[in-house]
């Protein structure tokens, strides 16, 4: 069975994801810059009012994934609030100035997230290190999954690397069970079957987004429904 996660940049998008049949979302805001931390109010709404399994992006600013100590303290405080608000997981990603996965900071985030799952996000795709070695670091830190496009613009373009990551992940544990590869970027109803067939992933991540008249990017319930229907046969 393939698990579908929908990236939702607002309450409106979360509502659309639920109408489309989604049960799990990654909640963020400002998707045009890659996503930032959503408000506490939006987290609470998605968890309690919508009853969705809510994975919260914790990213305080746009730009790179190297953070100052004051930003780190903000990130750790946000993780604590996510737990209190009932989030199922947090989504984080940290790199060192030389482009390696920041092991020390990832471990601090995992420790702060005790009781929740931790996804390491597509900062991984910007790392300047061997992807299998980077994966081993992420898993060793105690993360539960890796969101990746295989270091390519889209997951389908990076399918060969994603396949290698999936095979490697089967031999790894995070200390909390089997480590998952979550394939994301360019995942649509038209591409998802090919992606799953070529990579062997059991989790996919898509925004199912459309551009609204006001210029905002929002989730489309009909596209969510089609995506879920496409993977139902696997």
Image (tube, rainbow, N blue to C red):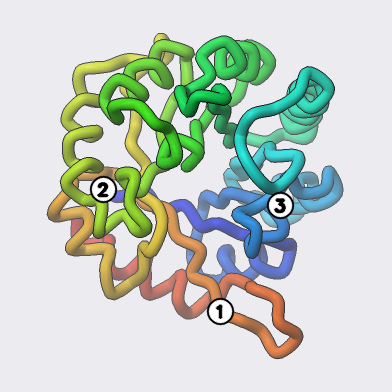
Snapshot quadrant of residue 133: top left
- Residue 106 position by quadrant: top right
Compared across the picture, whether 171 is left or right of 212 comes to left
Quarter in which the C terminus is drawn: bottom left
Residue drawn where x is 64% and y is 73% of the image = 217
In 3D space, how far apart are the residues under numbered discs 3 and 1 (Cα atoms)? 20 Å
Q: Are marks 3 and 1 in contact (CB under 8 Å)?
A: no
Alpha-carbon span between mark 3 and mark 2: 24 Å
Q: Secondary structure at mark 2?
A: loop
Judging by the rendered image, the residue that carries numbered circle 2 is 1
Does 84 appear above or below 155?
A: above
- The crowd level at tag 1 (other Cα within 10 Å; few <14, some 14-19, many 20+) is few
Quick check: can you spot residue 35? yes
Sooner in the amino-acid sequence: mark 2 or mark 1: 2
Q: Earlier in the sequence, mark 3 or mark 2?
A: 2
What secondary structure is found at the residue carrying circle 3? helix
Along the viewing direction, whichever of 18 and 200 lies nearer the viewer? 200
Q: Nearer the viewer, residue 131 or 57?
A: 131
How many numbered discs, if any? 3
Q: Position of residue 205 (x, y in %)?
A: 43, 53
Q: Give the residue displayed 71% in from the left and 69% down from the top.
A: 12
Around disc 3, counting alpha carbons within 10 Å, would you say few (fewer than 14), some (14 to 19), or many (20 or more)? many
Give the image location of residue 232, x and y in percent. Answer: 27, 61
Residue under circle 3? 46
Please provide percent x and percent y for residue 135: 34, 24
Which numbered marker is on residue 4?
Answer: none
Q: Which residue is under mark 1?
A: 210
Rendering quarter of residue 157:
bottom left
Which tag is nearer the camera, tag 2 or tag 1?
1
Q: Position of residue 162 (x, y in %)?
A: 24, 42
């Amino acid at each position: 069975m393939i698990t579908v996660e929908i990236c939702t940049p607002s309450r409106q998008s979360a509502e659309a994801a639920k109408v489309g049949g989604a049960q799990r979302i990654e909640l963020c805001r400002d998707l045009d810059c890659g996503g930032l931390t959503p408000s506490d109010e939006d987290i609470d709404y998605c968890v309690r009012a919508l009853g969705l399994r809510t994975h919260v992006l914790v990213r305080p600013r746009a730009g790179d994934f190297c953070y100052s100590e004051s930003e780190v303290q903000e990130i750790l405080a946000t993780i604590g609030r996510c737990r209190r608000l009932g989030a199922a997981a947090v989504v984080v990603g940290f790199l060192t100035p030389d482009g390696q996965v920041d092991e020390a900071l990832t471990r601090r985030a995992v420790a702060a997230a005790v009781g929740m799952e931790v996804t390491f996000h597509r900062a991984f795709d910007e790392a300047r290190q061997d992807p299998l070695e980077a994966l081993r670091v992420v898993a060793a830190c105690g993360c539960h999954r890796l969101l990746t496009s295989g270091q390519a613009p889209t997951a389908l373009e990076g399918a060969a690397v994603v396949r290698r990551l999936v095979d490697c992940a089967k031999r790894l544990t995070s200390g909390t069970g089997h480590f998952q590869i979550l394939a994301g970027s360019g995942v649509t109803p038209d591409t998802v079957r090919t992606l799953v067939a070529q990579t062997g992933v059991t989790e996919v991540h898509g925004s199912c987004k459309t551009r609204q008249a006001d210029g905002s990017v929002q989730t489309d319930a009909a596209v969510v429904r089609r995506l879920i229907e496409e993977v139902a046969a696997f």
